Amino acid sequence: MRDASKNNAAWDRLKDMPSTIGIGVAGNFTGHLEQAGEASDFRNVSTDHAAAPKGIFPFYVPGGGQHFLNTMPVSATSLALGSKTENHQIEPEVALLCRIQYAEKRVASLTPLYAMAHNDCSIRRPGALKISEKKNWGPETKGTSNQMISLDRFEKGGILDDYRVACFLLRDGVLVEYGLDSSVTGYSYYGTRLVDWLIEKMNNQQDQGPLEHIAHWLDVASQPDYALISIGATRYTDFGENTFLKSGDVASVILYDAKQHTQDAIRGFADGSKDTNEPGLSVLRQNVHLGSQR
């Protein structure tokens, strides 16, 4: 991270701007959908290539009046559970803040500007018709680090080559690895291939199964200038696959340069014992609580 204070200010501005839409990628890391129990949701969704992600979904849509996606869900510090009876899981990811440019209301270009640690927290809600129904249930239901890593270019050979994603849960004073420590370049679709695929889906994805017509949501948001895009959840450890969140937990997702930070340091960032104001790092730590609405 080249300038923490500048990047934090940029995040604070953009996360609340009406010109930023939130979009997630489903199935961009081998094995995650199976672990999350969601692979069957996509049984009728066809892809051009076996390794391709399944599609994209909205998790925040600014403007357009009252709909459940109109609530800003992103927090860098807190995570509100939707209820005591439903199961919630961390989804450790990389999020990209991207600039969108249009030609006649179609996405013409998508430029990744910053990368951040992201928690695409999900309710495991059997029978949900759309992915988005499990992604935004009010304020503080998503997490994005306010440490933004400036991108020189989003492709192999760029700044993220040596970055990895780690995920931990701190419960009752015990820190446990929740997600498998994974290379950012290990995503099925990455770099230019992912960006080109995203543009195609933003323009052409239709309402099918758990997926939605994204061009419609871009219209609702009046063709926003920016998109916060979470590019896919990594795999869980056995603990993460079988452990759901409860009030009092601390959930951490850490995007880090493996050449600059040791595994001991990563655990220190996760348990709060080590200062996170360091280069090559984007740390998200969220205090989990039961939302006031339920």
Image (cartoon, rainbow, N blue to C red):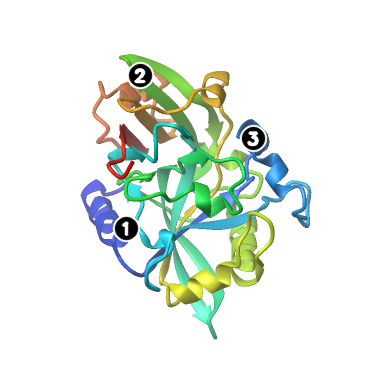
Q: Is residue 87 above or below residue 268?
A: below
Q: Is residue 12 above or below residue 84?
A: below
Q: Secondary structure at mark 3?
A: loop
How many numbered marks does the figure carry? 3
The quadrant where residue 214 appears: bottom right
Q: Earlier in the sequence, mark 1 or mark 3?
A: 1
Judge depth for marks 3 and 2 and give the one in front. Answer: 3
The residue that mark 3 highlights is 37
- Residue in view at x 34 percent, y 37 percent: 284
Task: Name the amino acid, label 1.
Answer: Lys
Instruction: Give the percent coordinates (x, y) of residue 151.
Output: 43, 53
Q: CA separation, marks 3 and 2?
A: 24 Å
Q: Earlier in the sequence, mark 1 or mark 2?
A: 1
- Residue in view at x 38 percent, y 68 percent: 66
Task: Name the amino acid, label 3.
Answer: Gly
On residue 15, the disc is 1
Instruction: Give the percent coordinates (x, y) of residue 187.
Output: 61, 43
> Do the residues bearing badges 1 and 3 touch, measured as CB atoms within 8 Å?
no
Residues packed near mark 1 inside 10 Å, few (<14), some (14 to 19) or many (20 plus): many
Judging depth in this view, the residue of 176 and 246 nearest the camera is: 246
Judge depth for marks 1 and 2 and give the one in front. Answer: 2
